[in-house]
Amino acid sequence: MALLLAAGAALAIDPGAAFDDPALQARYEGLTNQLRCVKCQNQTVADSNAPVARDLRQQVREMIAAGASDDEILAFMTDRYGNFVRYRPPLTGTTAVLWAAPFLLLAGGLTIGVVLMVRKSRLVSDDDCDDAEAPGEETP
Amino acid sequence: MMRSVLPLGAFTLLVIVFLVSLRSGRAPNLIESPLIGKPAPEFELQTLRDPERTFSRSDLLGQVSLVNVWATWCVECRHEHEFLMEISRSGLLPIYGLNWKNDRDEALRWLEVLGDPYLVTGFDDTGRVGIDWGVYGAPETFLVGPDGQVLYKRIGALNEGVWRHEILPLIQQAQVVGVQQ
């Protein structure tokens, strides 16, 4: 069972490595893992069985072999399929909200949490003042 | 007072955001084409019927046209075929076919049996030209202006509604501009 699980991670969609040169292979894997399969949109081009993904892997392979840089290959893809094809979308006016949102939400949540805690602790100390006089005890 | 207003306010804001997004009508998994407003890509393909002849970008120039991506294995292509025949019969504008990742004989047989709405069909069995058009499935249809600019892209089958509300106005606009030139 453990072997099956381990093997799953190592299985490539295409049989064998794309490049003998480990540096080129690393670039190939890096690129295909950050490109979204436009057909099966929650998978990378590296992982997807879709024919389009296979074509795009081939395209990346050819471009690396032809000497294109990573930037050139990514630009090639976004020119044709848009920013959506990149799993890490570039920071632009529109995607700024996407990138900032988790941090903003976290900051917002923390702020609310702190404010509520502070307010609650203030209420507790007010109660303490009242409790200084034990209930039922008459003040002369 | 702040305790009750803040969650309510945040909730209302979310509701507004969701409503706007839902009512926009755009299916979230359809990718907006970066080609809109840009020149159609350069390409040259063998025609489907005659490998000796070519179909290339220059054929698109001079009139508004449709470029329809299709294949015999594509069920939605089968559904939109009759509508394409209607457009073809109307003579409103030429339809060019891009036979995508398909077997040539099967494609020819399909056209023989169902009818051929295309002025010319390019044979893109490898899908390499499809990549340049940003194609990721079939059917897809592009509206191309007389100057070769991509005016519109439809992902999925063409139908009466899309045609009337989205494509026809663009065709009329482009044809008016064409006459003025």
Image (tube, rainbow, N blue to C red):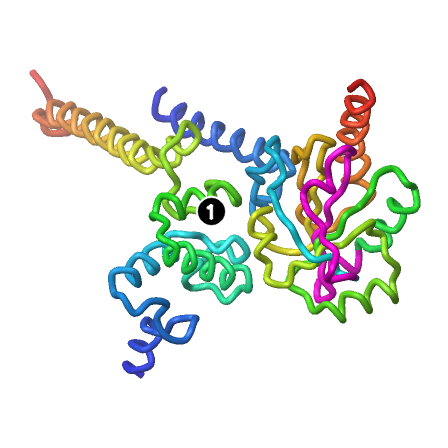
Tell which of B62 and B153 is nearer to you. Answer: B62
Q: Is residue B103 left or right of residue B4?
A: right
Q: Tag 1: residue type?
A: Met
The residue most toward the front is: B52
Magenta stretch contains residue B65: yes
On-image quarter of the N terminus of chain B = top left
Q: Can you say whether B144 is above or below B132 in the image? A: above
Q: Which residue is mark 1?
A: A77
Q: Can you say whether B28 is above or below A25 in the image? A: above
Q: Position of residue B6 (x, y in %)?
A: 38, 25
Q: Which residues fall within the magenta stretch?
A: B50-79
For image coordinates 46% across by 45% down, the residue present is A76
On-image quarter of the C terminus of chain B = top right
- Neighbours of disc 1 within 10 Å: few (<14), some (14-19), many (20+): many
For image coordinates 46% across by 62% down, the residue present is A58
For image coordinates 39% across by 26% down, the residue present is B4
For image coordinates 75% across by 60% down, the residue present is B48
Q: Chain of mark 1?
A: A
Q: Can you say whether B163 is above or below B55 in the image? A: above
**Quarter-wise, where is residue A11 in the image?**
bottom left
Q: Is residue B94 left or right of residue B32?
A: right
Tell which of B24 and A96 is nearer to you. Answer: A96
Tell which of A103 and B122 is nearer to you. Answer: B122
The residue most toward the right is: B89
